[in-house]
Image (cartoon, helix red, strand yellow):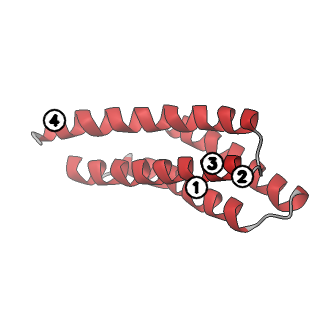
Amino acid sequence: METKSYNFANRVIRLYKHLSAEKKEFVLPKQLLRSKTSIGAPIRESEHAQSKADFLNKMSTALKETNETEYWLMLLKDTEYISKDEFDSLQKDCVEILRLLVSIIKSTKTALGR
């Protein structure tokens, strides 16, 4: 999970650099960058969670940020700042992370009896 999130963050950072330099667009890419880079941090923090509830909270934060990242990707595609191919490639990674996080959260809730 940590590796997938980290690799995805690298791709988004490169996209941010490209959109800022080539397209001179700063607002939307900055929002994407903020949400995407906020996915990996709670995942990393969860490695040393103080409890299962703390772990669940960190994974839930990562899930919210991943969902927000998908929103910004869709907006960049629909406003034609990125191509459909670029979107499809990035969104595939985003959806994979979403699914993994949902699975982790569900199994953690089950273990906590929620």
Element type where label 2 sits in the image: helix
The amino acid type found where label 1 is placed reads Thr
Q: Quadrant of residue 61?
A: bottom left
* Callout 1 crowding tier (Cα within 10 Å): few <14, some 14–19, many ≥20: many
Residue under the point 86% across and 64% down: 24
Q: Earlier in the sequence, mark 2 or mark 1?
A: 2
Instruction: Give the Cα distance between marks 2 and 1.
Output: 9 Å
Q: Earlier in the sequence, mark 1 or mark 4?
A: 1
Residue under the point 76% across and 67% down: 26
Outermost residue on the bottom side: it is: 27
Instruction: Give the Cα distance between marks 3 and 2.
Output: 13 Å
The amino acid type found where label 2 is placed reads Ile
Q: Earlier in the sequence, mark 3 or mark 4?
A: 3
Measured along the vertical axis of the image, is residue 114 above or below residue 49?
A: above
Q: Where is mark 2, residue-wise?
A: 13
Tell me whether the residue at label 1 lies in contact with that at label 4, contact meaning CB atoms closer than 8 angstroms.
no
Which part of the image, by quadrant, shows the C terminus?
top left
Residue under the point 54% across and 51% down: 71
Residue 38, horizontal then vertical, whole percent: 52, 57
Q: Where is mark 1, residue-wise?
A: 37
Q: Earlier in the sequence, mark 3 or mark 2?
A: 2
Q: Earlier in the sequence, mark 4 or mark 2?
A: 2
Instruction: Give the Cα distance between marks 1 and 3.
Output: 14 Å
Per the rendering, the mark at residue 73 is 3
